[in-house]
Image: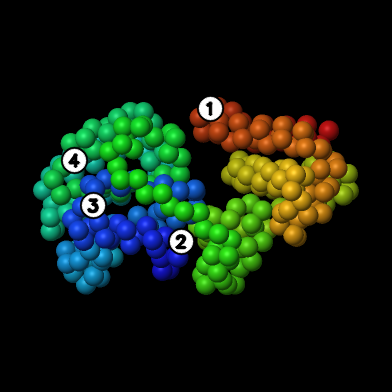
Amino acid sequence: MSLPIWLEDEYRQIVALKQSQSLSHALLIIGPQGVGQEVLSNLLSMDLMCERSSSACGVCHSCELMKANTHPDYYLVDGRKDSIKVDQIRTLSKQVSKKAQVGKTKVLHLMHVQSMNMNASNALLKILEEPPQGTYFLLTAFQAASLLPTIKSRCLLINVPTPNENDVRQWLADNYSDKNLDALFWLTTQPYELAQLSDSGKDVFYLEFPDRLELCIDLSSNVTSFLKGLDSKNVLDYIKATQALCHQSVLFSVSHTGVIEHLSLYEKMLSRFGVHKMLTLYTSLQQLKENVGRTNLNALMQFKYEINKWFS
């Protein structure tokens, strides 16, 4: 996929800094989750490793190694699936302290650095304070508040803008024309989050979720049918979808706007539960989501408890 329109200005500015040899050794790329920080940082990684020009030429030895994911001077730590540990940072610190094996440049690329704990953050800070020669640091995050101020102060901050709905619709039409992903705007309008749902096959679950909830409300049934299929592997999807619909319903109660397909659902949720009860559930689910993986809390049982209490 080509670079989307909402990332082009930031990309051009960074390339210009590289061309003028005034680019910082450390970049922190921040934006809402799913807006495309990783797409921008991946492209910049290619550019920084190129031996010939400010933007990747695609044909030099380094570019060929990068395309094959075998460049010995490129180090990637992906915090999207698991938190970044201090041992990973310490290992990378030793590796980047060595002389580059190809060319003169090394790149340390860390995605989702907000997932670092304090020990990992302090280890990274130490490298940033005394960067090895010829080393660039590319960091991405979607929660700047959780990062050490001293880490942010040592990086050039790149704020990725949130695309408008028209840009997202066009991007989806260009890249996912066979999908109905704009029907998930009640859940998120972030393009790469929608893309991830499609690529993982989870878009089907979310597309069906509002109708399942509306049917449960219409029939005034117990929640057994609504929770059918719920297990420990998809409980976070149930939490996320329920939260999003509560949020959209509360917005609708104030502004009478929302995804057109689900206005009847918002009205029924407001009539059945009321604003206060939906806000209470939203808050409870947010706390539950934050505790998943941090405590021994049984998220599956807790979610069932919250939903049953909601319908009671």
In this view, the mark in front (3 or 4): 3
Label disc, if present, on residue 6 of the rendered structure: 2
On the image, numbered disc 4 is attached to which residue?
Answer: 131
Earlier residue among tags 2 and 4: 2
- Confirm or deny contact between disc 2 and disc 4 (CB under 8 A): no
Looking at the image, the residue that sits furthest to the right is: 219
Task: Residue at 71%, 35% (x, y): give it.
Answer: 279
| Residue type for callout 3 | Leu
Task: Residue at 55%, 59% (x, y): give it.
Answer: 164
Helix, strand or loop for disc 1: loop
Helix, strand or loop for disc 3: loop
User: What x and y, as percent, mark residue 75?
Assistant: 26, 49
- Confirm or deny contact between disc 3 and disc 1 (CB under 8 A): no
Q: How are the residues colored?
A: rainbow
Helix, strand or loop for disc 2: helix
Question: Can residue 8 be seen in this snapshot?
Answer: yes
